[in-house]
Amino acid sequence: MQTIVEQPNRCSRSAIVKLPLYVLVLFLLQACHSLNIESARTLAEEGRNVAAAGSSQIFVSDMEFRNAREAEVFMHAYAGAEKPDQILEYYKSIMLELSKRKTVFTNLASLYAIFYDLSSNDAPARIETAVNNLGDAVNNYATTLSSAPFLSNESVTKAGAIAHAAMSARKKNMIMQSSVLIRERLHRLLKLLENPLVRQQLVTWKMNLAQNRAAVAQMLMSHGVLDATPLLNQMGSDAGLQGAPDAADIIRKNTRLSNGLEQVIVYRMQNNLLAIDKGYDATCKAIRELIHLHEQLEKGEPVTVASVRQAIAELQSIAEQLNK
Amino acid sequence: MQTIVMDGNLQMAEALAAFNASTLAATAALPKALDKCETEQQMQKIIADRDIVQLAYINALHKSLKHTGPLFEQIAKDLACAAKEIEKKSKKLTSAADALSLLADAARLASALALAFV
């Protein structure tokens, strides 16, 4: 009789004890949205790649700048004119101003490095171990005091798993918030880069300096002081041929040959100028792809990095073309 | 057409593009033009003419940079702030795990101390 009376009481007590646990599990299930931590890590890596490739594509490197300034000095000295101090001063001032803008890409790369750290944070695993260790320590304490263990092994393990889940949910939530933060800034950066004036400033500056270098290369080539053998090697490579040992001498003595090669150089330089434009567009495209990846991550959709990798590959191929 | 007139940025961008096209053409023509000169005076005249075009472009670029500089500075600042915020989140996660780990260590220590008094 007693048991019959006590049964419902035990049930209701047990239900009361379990209620907070259910609430907790429910909360965790809600918090643990489908955001994929591995995808966040991949996205962080791609973000860093885009920042690095974009920066080298949009901004003039120190070597490009130095060579362009020296080209300017050469052209004037060649013509018997004075060193163009005013132009060189302007160059320096513009380069300084544009270098400050490079900070945007440096900061973007740092931001993605930190986002990667957050995504790789091992706090959930560590907290599970800590909870398990705490349970073991409490039981050891009880054993030391000759008392029965306070916690069963099973409940210690469960507590650890719950702590792991809670920490994972918290981490995912933080990744989600961080992704939104980054995405919003990427939107603004893209808008700025797509601003017609910004675009003209960065693209024309890079083109202008490239044209200086190209003009001097052409002048040196026309005087036969540049060895055209690498160019000959490239032209003959399809047929498996390379420049003859005395090719440079032959070219120097043959006007038609040297004119032909000079035109190839001019053509190549013109294509390089066009590649600067393409590189700028490719950077904007890569940033657009990154924004899309952030949106996918935040929606819990699988992050497909193929398109952003293609955009990075495009950037790298343009950089190779410019460095040839 | 209206947007070109209305939007200051676009107008400036178009002007910059036009200046750049002139200076690119002038510099590209320089090797051949200098090659055709017979006297140094002719060469100096050619390079001086090219410099006028080049100066027009770099002067315009220099002035226009003042318009867009603050926009880049603001984004650079925002990116740095976001990095700090995310770093703070990461540290919060780490410190929560650290705190519990510390608690487990403390309990272990308590157990060891209790043993000494048994």
Image (cartoon, rainbow, N blue to C red):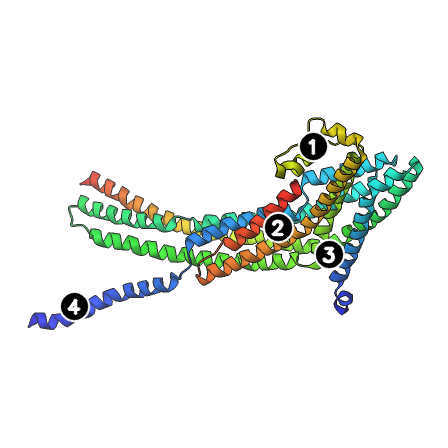
State the residue position of label 4. A10
Q: Residue at x 78, y 30 (%)?
A: A252
Q: Nearer the viewer, mark 4 or mark 3?
A: 3
Which one is nearer the viewer's eye here, B28 or A308? Answer: B28
Quarter of the image for the N terminus of chain A: give it.
bottom left
* Residue A113 drawn above or below residue A245: below
* Residue A198 drawn above or below residue B116: below
Mark 2: amino acid: Val
Give me the chain letter of mark 3.
B
- Report how far apart the C-alphas of labels 4 and 3 lie in the structure: 75 Å
State the residue position of label 2. A104
Is disc 4 placed on a helix, strand or loop?
helix
Q: Is residue A226 left or right of residue B72?
A: right
Quarter of the image for the C terminus of chain A: give it.
top right
Q: Nearer the viewer, mark 4 or mark 1?
A: 1
State the residue position of label 3. B67
Mark 1: amino acid: Thr
